[in-house]
Image: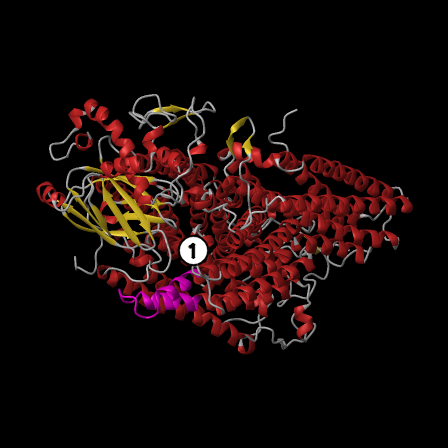
Amino acid sequence: MSMATPIVTPVEREDYLNKEYGIASWLLTTDHKRIALLYLISITFFFFIGGFFALLIRLELLTPAGDLVQADTYNKLFTMHGQVMVFFFLIPSIPAVLGNFLIPMMIGAKDLAFPRINLLSWYLYIIAGIMMLHCILTGGVDTGWTFYTPFSTAFSNTKVIEAGLAIFVSGFSSILTGLNFVVTIHRMRAPGMTWSRLPLFVWSHYATSIIQILGTPVIAITLVLVVAERALHLGIFDPKLGGDPLLFQHLFWFYSHPAVYIMILPSMGVVSEVIACFSRKRIFGYHFVALSSLAIAVFGFLVWAHHMFVAGISVYAALVFSLLSYSVAVPSAVKVFNWTATLYKGSIHYDAPMLYAFGFLGLFTIGGLTGLFLAALGIDVHVTDTYFVVAHFHYIMVGGALMGYLGGLHFWWPKISGRLYPEGWARLAALIVFVGFNLTFFPQFILGYVGMPRRYYQYPGEFQVLNVMSTAGATVLGIGYLLPMIYFLWSMRYGKPAPDNPWKAAGLEWQTQSPPTTFNFEKEPVVTWEAYNYDEIDTGHKEEVKVVG
Amino acid sequence: MSDSQATAQTSVHEDLHSPALLHHFATEEQQRNASSFGMWIFLGTEVMFFGGLFVSYLIYRLWYFGDFGAASKSINAALGGTNTAVLICSSLTVVLAIWAAQTARRGMLLVMLALTMLFGVAFLGIKGIEYKDKFDEHHVPGASFSFQNVPIPGHPDQYANPQHAQIFFALYFIMTGLHALHMVVGLGIFTWLFVSAWKGRFTPEYHTPLEIGGLYWHFVDIIWIYLFPLLYLIDRHP
Amino acid sequence: MFDNFPLWPARASTAAGNVDALYIFLIIVSGMMTLLVFTAIIIFAARYRHRRGVLAEQIEGSIPLEVTWSIIPLGVFMVIFVWGAVVYFHSRTPPRDSTDVYVVAKQWMWKLQHAEGQREINSLHIPVGRDVRLIMTSQDVIHSFFVPAFRMKQDVLPGRYTTAWFHATKAGTYHLFCAEYCGTQHSGMIGDIVVMEPAQYEAWMSGGNTGPLSATGEKLFAELGCATCHRSDTQGRGPTLQGVFGKPVQLQDGRIVTADENYIRESILDPGSKIVNGFKPVMPTFQGLVSEEQVNALVAYVKSLSAASAVKTNTAMAQPTAPAKGNQVQ
C-alpha cells in the first residue's frame, strides 16, 4: 500500500499529510488522523488475508468431496478466517479508522484525549497482528474462532496458545481505543457541543466503547485461563479433571456476543450520517436513534447464552435468554424505522455512500429478522450450528458492518485524502457488492434449514447446488471488494482535488479544510447550531463557524 | 499487566512531561479531568478482568464446596492476614503522600512514597514465602500436584477430592498471581512518582499523576480485600 | 425438487411439524416486515429524489410513531417468543416410558446401544411411532447429535449426560450429523438414522441380540463388587438401589436431589460429591476403571431396578409394539 505517500495538493496548503515526511513522522505520530491511516493500511492487509482464507473455503465447498485441501487445512482455514476477520478486521475497522479520524473533528477537538495511548493501541494491534501472522505461518490453529473447550485445551494439536495470546494482545488495543473515545467524548467537546448536538456517529461510538471497555477484559481473562489450562492442565475447563466446559462458553459469549455490536454499532453511526446528508435532512427521531445505540450496548450484555440453547443449559435459563434476546431486537428495529422515515420528504441524492447505506439497510434488515428465527428457541434447536447461523451473522457482520465501513470510507474519503474518488466506479462497486453478497449468503439460509452443519469440509451431494451458488456469489463479492481498493489508490494520485465540503454536509469535520491540518481547527469552534442543520445549509442561511479567542 | 503499566505511565508521563498545558487540551482543568476520568474507566476494565475470575471461583466454590474449604485451609492465613494489614497501611501512606503534595510538604511526600513502595515490596516478599510453602507442599497444580487424604472441614471421615482441590489452587495461583503482577506494575509507577517528586515536579496546584497513581494503588488493594476472604478465610472457625 | 437442490428437509418426526409451522410463520412475518421496509425505502427514494429547487422538509420526529413502532414489533416478538418456547419445551420434555438408546460420541464416531442390547456404530435403527430417548455422553470433546429430518439437535458433552428425544413418524433413512466442531474428521462424523416399520424393526431387533443392556450392567455390578455394599435389603454399607431411580434422595448436607441418570453417573465416578444421608463416604471412585459404555450399562441396570414399579403404574402407556423392558430384567 502506498497510502503513506504524501500528497501534494495543487494549492500548497499545509495539512496533516504534507506537514512532515519520513517514516518516523508516521510511526511516531500522535496525530489521530495519521494513526487512523496507519490502521487503515494494517486492517486492509488483514482484510485481504481473511478474504483469501474465505476464498479457499468457498473453493473447497464447490464440490461435496474434500478434494482441494486436507481436512486439517480446511479446519485451519475457517478458524483463521474467523479470527483474522473478527479480531483483526471487523472489531478495529470503523472505530480505529473512521472513529479515530473523525471523532475529535466531529466534537471540535484537536485530538483524542490521550494521543500517545492512541499510538500505543496501534502498536499493540501490530504486535498482535505479527503474533497472529507468525501463528498462521508456522502451522496455524484449528479450534474454530470460538476456542471451545476441551477441544482447544486438551485435544487440538495446533498453535492454540499462540493464537490465544495474539487475540489477548489485540484485545488491549481495542480496550485502549474505547477508553480514549469515552474520555474524549466526555471531556473534549467544544463549547456548545451538547450531548443532544452530537452526531449520531459519535453516539454510536460511545456505545461501542462501553462494550469494548467492559466486554473485552472478560475475553482476555478467558483466554488467559485457556492458555494456562492448555499449558498446565489445571482442570478449570476440562471435565476429566473436574472442570466445566460450559463455563468457558459462558465466559466466551459474554464478550463475543456484545462483540457483534462492537462491529455493527459504528456502522449504524456511519449510516446515520450518510442518510442525513444525502436526504438533506435531520435524522428522524434523533434522540431515539442515539439512545437505541446505548440500549443495544446495555442489553447486548444480557443475551449471551442464546448461543448455547442446545449446549446443555437448563430449559429455564434458555427461556430467560430467549426472552432477553428480543430486547435487543426492539432498538435495532427502531433504528431501521427511523432511517426509513428520514427518507420521507427528503431530497435524496444517489451518490455512492448513499448506495452503500441503502445496501446496509437492506442487508441489516434481513440479518436482523433472521436473528428473530435464532432467538426463537424451537427454531434455534434446528438451525443453530448450521449454515443458517453462518448466513445470519454474515448478513450482520459483513452485510451490515462492512457495508457501513465502505460507505463511510467513500463518504469521508475526500476529507481523509483530499481527493475525490471516481463516482461511476464507486456506484458500480456498491452494486456489485450488494448483488454478490446476496448471491453468496442467501443460499446459505436455505442450506442451513435443510440441515447442512457449519464447519463441514465435505458434505452430502444434495447440498451441492446451493454451495455452488454461494461460491459463485463469493467470486462476485471478491471483485466488488477489490474495486474500491483499486480506485481509492488510483484517486490518491489522479483523483480531482476535493473541496473542503464536497457533499455540503453538516458536521464540524466538514468545516475543516480537506485534508485537515494537524490540529484540525485553527481556533476552537463554538457550536451554536443543532446537529444535521441541513435546512440552514440548503437555504443559504447557514451560520458561520463561530470561534473564540 | 503490561497494558496497565503502559496506560498509567503514559498518562502520567503526558501530564508530567510538561506541567504546562498539552497542546490538544483547552484548559488545565480539562486536562486534569481527562486524566483521572481515564483512570476510572481503566479501573472499570480491570474490574471486569478480575470479574471473570471471581465468577469462575464462585461457580466452583458452589460445586465443590467442601473440597474448596479443605484446600483453603491449607493456606497460611496468618501470612495472608499480615499481607492484608500491609496493604491497608500502604493505602494510608498513599493518601498521606497526596495530602503532603497538596500542602507542599516535599519531605513528607518523599517519605510516604518510599513507605508505600516498602509496603509493596513487603507484600510481594510475604507472597513469595507463601508460594514457596505451597511449592514445598506440592500444592502447585501440574504433574507433581498432590492433595491426598486431606479431610473436608466438618466431615472428618471424608477426604477432599484432589482434582477439585487442584482447581482451587489453579484459581488461587492465577488470581493472586495476576494481583501480584498488578503490584509489580504499581511499584514501577511509584518508583517513577518518587523520582518525579524528588525532582520537585509536584506542587499543590499540580499533582495529578499522584492522584492517578494513587487510584491505581487503591484499586489493587481493593482487589486484595476481596481475594483474602475468598481464598484464605472461607472455612476458618474460631 | 431436484435431488441435489433441496429447499426443505424431510419431515419425519412429531417435532418437525411444530418447528416447520413456527418457521413458516416467521418467514411470513419477517417477509412482511422486509416488504414493508423495502417498499417504504423504494417509494421514498423514488418519490423524494432530489429535484432542483425543491428542498427537503425538515421533520423532527414523532413520539407516537416511535412508540408505535416499538410496541408493535415487541408484541410480535413476544408471540414468536412464546411460540418458540412452547415448541422448545415440548422438544426438551421426554414423555414417560420412552425407549432408551445410549449414545457415546468420540472423535469421530457415534457408538449407540439400545436398552435391549443391540450395538450400532454410526447408524441407529428405530421403529416408526415410538418415543425414543437418547442418553448421550462423549469420551473426548463436545459433539452434537443432529438429525435434520427430526429437527432435533443436542450437544453431547464429556463428563455428563445430556438427553434428547424424538418420535419418528415416517420410515426412511435420514442424515445424522455431528453439529459441534470436534476436530479433523468433524464432517466425517456422520451416520444414518434408519426409521423402520414396527414389524421390520422387530425382525431387525431379534437378529444377533446379546441381551438387554441392563443385564450387562447387572453382571458388571456383580463383577465390580458393587453388590457387597449396595445390597437389595437395607443392611448394606451403601444405600440400597432398589427403586431409587427417579426418586428424590436426601443427602448428608441436607440437599435433596433427584436420582436421574446424571446422579447415578456421578455417584459411580465421583462418589464423594453427593453422600446419601445416613451413610459414610467409603465408596471408592470408579473413574478410569470403567468405560463410558460400562457406565451406561450400570446406569441401565440401576434404572431397571425401578422399572418394574414404573411399568405397573403406567400400564396404559405401554404400546403393543414396545417390548416391556422391565420384564426382561426380572
Q: Position of residue A477 (x, y in %)?
A: 38, 66
Instruction: Determine which quarter of the picture holds residue A308.
Output: top left
Can residue B238 be spotted in the picture? Answer: yes
Asked which secondary structure carries label 1, the reply is helix
- Magenta span has B221? no
**Residue B201 in the figure: left or right of residue C67:** right
Does residue B158 sit above or below B143 in this rendering?
A: above
Residue type at mark 1 is Phe
Q: Position of residue C132 (x, y in %)?
A: 22, 38
> Which quadrant holds the N terminus of chain A?
bottom right
Residue drawn 47% across the image and 45% down it = A241
Q: Position of residue A218 (x, y in %)?
A: 55, 47
C17 vs A477, nearest the viewer: C17
Disc 1: CA contacts within 10 A as few (<14), some (14-19) or many (>=20): some
Residue drawn 24% across the image and 30% down it = C96
Residue drawn 26% across the image and 35% down it = C218
| Residue at numbered disc 1 | A155
Task: Report the span colored magenta.
Answer: A51-79
> Which quadrant holds the C terminus of chain A?
bottom right
Residue drawn 45% across the image and 56% down it = A145
- Magenta span has A59? yes
